[in-house]
Each structure stands twice: as structure tokens, then as C-alpha cells.
Amino acid sequence: NAGVTQTPKFQVLKTGQSMTLQCAQDMNHEYMSWYRQDPGMGLRLIHYSVGAGITDQGEVPNGYNVSRSTTEDFPLRLLSAAPSQTSVYFCASSYSPRGYGYTFGSGTRLTVV
Amino acid sequence: GQQLNQSPQSMFIQEGEDVSMNCTSSSIFNTWLWYKQDPGEGPVLLIALYKAGELTSNGRLTAQFGITRKDSFLNISASIPSDVGIYFCAGQGNYGGSQGNLIFGKGTKLSVKP
């Protein structure tokens, strides 16, 4: 099983550019979420989805958009990148709303210059 | 919003030593989780706790869900070099909806004593 696959692994953007971080899971999980990790800040929730067609905001949603057209995919879009969005981004999925079911991807390291 | 205070922020270990870390919250949680993150990887679940007072072990790791439901601790016994990494606690409120999302502590970084 591939689990949760995130692409790309690394990305450098210029301020104002847009891009999409991809996340795919092959475990038929209903719950998917995006976190960002900054030094000394732990992981903070950006957006989450409880199923195809349903998304909602987390703690730090500004500057990010998501959609969930299929169970497998949950892309994160940066419409106009800013240096403050320099971070490591993690996608996670879960078969259950209970926390033990969360599987994390290996992350995308994004630098905005 | 809810916040988790995780301590210590960092610590150095010598092989064979026992290690303790804890998390406290201003809110109660229904689930406490402990994750470990290795460099360049995503967090991996170590232990999950579901009931106040619960004490659970996973090999050399032991974690407890505090009686007040506002705290949890993780102990690592007889540490080994591969224990280095960042350990996160995470709390979860009600299952489902926004309260089902995980709230993470800021992490405890374990390093080897020089």
C-alpha cells in the first residue's frame, strides 16, 4: 500500500505565484486534512474534509483553498504565494474520526522567496 | 482556540536513560495521542489513549491519560539512539466535525548528548 502520497517533496516559489500541493491516499479514508509545520509551532490545521464534496476551515486557512472531488484526492492550492507560507506541509487521512486512524504523508517543503 | 503546552521543548538523552515529557491543556479532550517524527518524515502514531486514567504501553514507551482529561505524559525507558526525533502530543475533542480535529503540542525534540 502506498498510504498517503504527497507531491512534490520540495518546491520553491516566487512571491505571487500559485501552485497546488497534491495529496492522494489509497486507503478509502473519508477524513483528510492539511497541516503546516513551522519551527517551534507544532502542526497547525489548515483545512480538512470529512468526505468527497465536503470541506471546512481549520485554524490557519487564510491564503489556501481546497476541494475534494474524489475520496482519494485532497489538493491544497496557494493562490498567491507569500513568504509567510514558507513551511512544511503535511497531508493526513483517517478511516475514522478517532485520532488513532490518522496516517500522515511525508510532507512537502515549500519555500517562498 | 484550544492550546496544548508540551514540555520540555528539548532534551538530551544518553543511551540507557529514562525520558519523560508531558502535555497540558486548558480544555478537556476525549483522546490523547503521542506521535514521533523523524527528520524528513511525517508524524507516526506511537500511543493512543481514550479513557481518563488509562495507562498504555508500547514496548519501552508508556503513556497516561490524566484523570482531569487535561493532561497526558509519555515515558521512554532505557533510551536508545534511534529514539531521537521530535515527539508530539495531540488532543482530540468530540469525534467528527471540527471538534474531531487534532490539536498538536509544539513538540519535544530529543537529541543525543554530545
Image: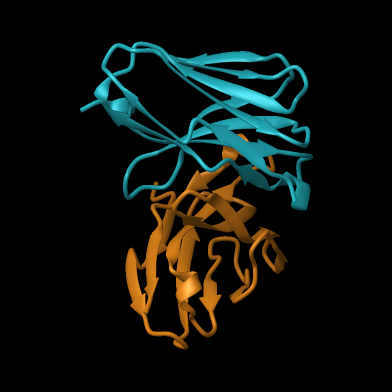
What colour denotes chain A? orange
Nearest the viewer among A94 and B104 is B104
Q: Quadrant of the C terminus of chain B?
A: top left
* Image-quadrant location for residue B105: top right
The residue at the point 76 percent across, 52 percent down is B98
Nearest the viewer among B112 and B98 is B112
Q: Residue A99 in the image: x percent, y percent?
A: 63, 38
Q: Residue A22 in the image: x percent, y percent?
A: 46, 68
Q: Residue B75 in the image: x percent, y percent?
A: 48, 17
Q: Residue B69 in the image: x percent, y percent?
A: 75, 25
The residue at the point 49 percent across, 71 percent down is A85
The residue at the point 75 percent across, 36 percent down is B26
Is A108 positioned to the left or the right of A23 in the image? left
* Image-quadrant location for residue B25: top right
Q: How many marks?
A: 0
Is B108 positioned to the left or the right of B24 in the image? left
Is B25 positioned to the left or the right of A13 in the image? right
Q: State the residue lying farthest toward the left.
A: B114
From this view, report whether residue A67 is shown above or below residue B49. Answer: below
Q: State the residue lying farthest toward the bottom.
A: A16
Please name the colour scheme applied to the rendered image.
Answer: by chain
Is B80 positioned to the left or the right of A49 in the image? left
What colour denotes chain B? cyan
